[in-house]
Image (spheres, grey):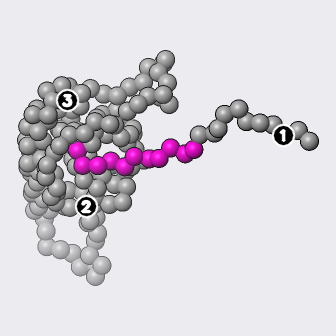
Amino acid sequence: IFFRVCSRMPKGPSKKIWPKRGQVLIILAGPYRGKRVICLQEVQHAVFLVTGPFKVNGVPLRRVNRRYVICTSTYVDIGDVGSKVPDELFQKKPKNRPNPSGGSKEKTEEKFFEEKEKKRNAFMELRKNTQKEIDTPLIQKLKEADPLLLKYLASTFTLQNNTKPHELKF
């Protein structure tokens, strides 16, 4: 009986690297595809809170699933920046449904749209203020760590025709 001898050992499965606070990630899908962002914290299992910062590359505070990011080997000491972010930023808005009893609410169209606009403006102000609270100290920490880090975050990740992604070291 003849047994074929394997000339090389097969590779085992690669261990996934989980993002840590301050690690630079590359977003793979969505409107911010190819952007480099900083991981602030893990919100849920495999869901991470990331930011650009917005002034550097235009990526706001976002929640990103682990499947849609590549972890790089670049770390930044961010201290306690972004450790407390309000959950209201990421909750879905309840839909306006008609009154189940069939009665009509005493509202005119003007009042309805005014209230809707006030709620929207308050929400947008909360997002802007939270973004500023996180980005200002984060940009300072990035400048202290390395001045080129801001340019690195501002650049997008792309592949060329002759690039072999399986041989890249992130």
Q: Amino acid at mark 2?
A: Gln
Measured along the vertical axis of the image, is residue 95 above or below residue 147? below
User: Quarter holding the C terminus?
Assistant: top left
Of the numbered discs in the image, which one, if any, rests on residue 3?
Answer: 1
Residue 114 in magenta stretch: no
Is residue 124 shown above or below 140?
below
Q: Hey, what amino acid is under mark 3? A: Leu
Q: Residue 149 shows which numbered tag? A: 3
Magenta stretch: includes residue 14: yes
Q: CA distance from mark 2 to mark 1?
A: 61 Å
- State the SS at label 1: loop
The local crowd at label 3, few if under 14, some if 14 to 19, many if 20 or more residues have their Cα within 10 Å, is some
Frontmost of labels 1 and 3 is: 1
Horizontal side of residue 25 vs 13, given as left or right: left
Q: Position of residue 33 (x, y in %)?
A: 35, 35
Q: Quadrant of the N terminus?
A: top right
Where residue 80 appears, x then y in whole percent? 13, 52
Q: Amino acid at mark 1?
A: Phe
Dot 3: element: helix
Question: What residue is shown with label 2?
Answer: 91
The foreground one among 165 and 55 is: 165
Cα gap from disc 2 to disc 3, whole angstroms: 32 Å
